[in-house]
C-alpha cells in the first residue's frame, strides 16, 4: 500500500498518481503489509496463547484445590463432630448442675433431648443396681444351699459337691426390666402430657414438657447412683430407703409439671394433679406386678435348683 503524502489517501502499491488529488506517488515507498500484519496480529496471538495457558493453569489449580479440599473434608468433619459433641456434653452438664442446685427454677436447655437423656440414665442406673443386687443374692443363696447340701452329705457319709444349684439369668432379666421401665415411663409421661394439654389451653411442646419434668427430677440421678453404690455394698436397707425417696421425687416431679405451669386453664390445676396421681398409682401397680412376676421366677428357679 502507498500513502499519499499530500492528502493521506491509501492507494494500491502499483498506483503512480493519487486518484484523489493527482499527486505523484512514484517515489513514495510501499509499506510492508505482512510486517504490519505480523506486528498487528502476532502480539494478539501471543496474548491469546498466554490467556489459554493461564486458563489451563487456573483449571489445574482449581482441580487440585478441590481434590485437596475433598481429601481434607472427612478429617474436618470428624473434628467438627468431636467439637460439637464436647460442647453438647458441656451444655448438658451445666444444665444438670443448674437443675440440682435449683430444681424449681426451670430453664430451657440448649438441646431438646437433654430431658430424655436424663430419664434414660436414671432407668439404666436402676437396672444396673438390680442386676448387681440379683447377682449378689443368687451367689449368697448358692453358697447357703451348698453349705446345707454339704452338711447333709457329711452326715450321710457321701461325697461333698459344690455347684451352683440356682440358675438365674440376671443380665437378661435386668435388660428386660430396663425395656419395661422405659416403656412404662414413656407411657406415664405421655398420659401426663395429655393431661397437661387438656388442663391448659396453650399447647406445650412434648420435648419442652419432658425437659421441665427432668429439671424437677434430675435429683433422681443422684439417688439412683446411691442406689447402685449401696447395691455394690449389699446395703439392702439403704437401698430400700433410697428407692422410696426416688419414687417420692418422681411423683413430686409429675405433679409439679402440672401445678407450676403458667397459662390459661380449661380446668383447675388441682384436678389435673389428681388425675396425674391416679395415673401414677396405676403405673406403680403395674410395676409391682412386674416385680412380683420376677420374684416368682426367682423362687421357682430356687426351688427347682434345690430339688435337683
Image (cartoon, helix red, strand yellow):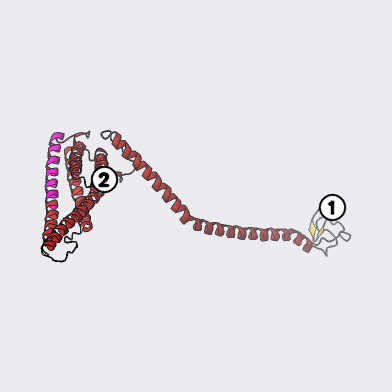
Residue 64 figure quarter: bottom right
* Residue 212 tag number: none
Q: Is residue 180 visible?
A: yes
Label 2 sits on a secondary structure element that is: helix
Q: Position of residue 195 (x, y in %)?
A: 16, 41
The residue that appears at 80% across and 53% down in the rendered structure is 8
Above or below, 215 relative to 79: above
- For this view, does 60 lie left or right of residue 242? right
Q: Is residue 63 magenta?
A: no
Between 281 and 23, the one lying in front of the other is 281
Q: Earlier in the sequence, mark 1 or mark 2?
A: 1
* Residue 229 tag number: 2
The chief SS type of the magenta part is helix
Q: Position of residue 167 (x, y in %)?
A: 18, 61
- Quick one: which residue is furthest to the right in this view? 27
Between 298 and 45, the one lying in front of the other is 298
- Distance of mark 1 from mark 2, alpha carbons? 116 Å
Mark 1 = which residue?
Answer: 6
Crowd around label 1: few <14 · some 14–19 · many ≥20 (10 Å): few
Residues shaded magenta = 266-290
Amino acid at each position: 500500500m502507498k500513502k499519499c503524502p499530500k492528502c493521506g489517501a491509501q492507494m494500491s502499491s502499483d498506483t503512480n498518481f493519487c486518484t484523489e488529488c493527482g499527486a505523484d506517488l512514484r517515489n513514495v515507498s510501499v509499506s510492508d503489509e505482512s510486517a504490519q500484519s505480523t506486528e498487528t496480529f502476532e502480539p494478539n496471538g501471543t496474548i491469546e496463547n498466554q490467556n489459554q495457558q493461564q486458563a489451563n493453569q487456573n483449571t489445574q489449580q482449581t482441580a487440585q484445590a478441590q481434590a485437596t479440599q475433598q481429601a481434607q473434608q472427612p478429617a474436618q468433619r470428624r473434628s467438627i463432630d468431636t467439637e460439637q459433641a464436647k460442647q453438647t456434653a458441656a451444655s448438658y452438664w451445666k444444665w444438670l448442675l443448674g437443675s440440682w442446685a435449683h430444681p424449681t427454677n426451670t430453664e430451657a436447655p440448649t438441646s431438646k433431648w437433654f430431658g430424655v437423656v436424663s430419664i434414660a440414665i436414671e432407668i439404666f442406673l436402676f437396672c444396673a443396681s438390680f442386676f448387681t443386687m440379683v447377682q449378689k443374692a443368687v451367689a449368697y443363696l448358692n453358697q447357703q444351699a451348698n453349705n446345707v447340701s454339704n452338711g447333709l452329705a457329711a452326715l450321710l457319709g457321701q461325697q461333698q459337691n459344690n455347684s451352683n444349684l440356682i440358675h438365674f439369668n440376671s443380665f437378661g432379666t435386668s435388660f428386660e426390666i430396663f425395656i419395661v421401665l422405659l416403656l412404662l415411663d414413656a407411657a406415664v409421661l405421655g398420659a401426663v402430657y395429655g393431661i397437661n394439654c387438656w388442663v391448659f389451653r396453650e399447647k406445650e411442646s412434648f420435648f419442652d414438657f419432658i425437659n421441665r419434668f427432668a429439671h424437677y427430677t434430675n435429683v433422681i440421678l443422684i439417688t439412683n447412683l446411691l442406689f447402685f453404690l449401696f447395691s455394690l455394698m449389699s446395703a439392702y436397707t439403704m437401698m430400700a430407703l433410697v428407692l422410696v425417696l426416688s419414687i417420692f421425687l418422681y411423683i413430686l416431679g409429675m405433679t409439679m409439671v402440672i401445678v407450676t405451669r403458667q397459662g390459661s386453664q380449661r380446668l383447675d390445676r388441682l384436678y389435673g394433679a389428681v388425675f396425674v396421681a391416679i395415673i401414677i398409682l396405676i403405673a406403680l401397680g403395674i410395676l409391682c406386678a412386674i416385680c412380683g412376676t420376677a420374684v416368682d421366677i426367682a423362687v421357682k428357679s430356687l426351688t427347682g435348683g434345690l430339688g435337683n
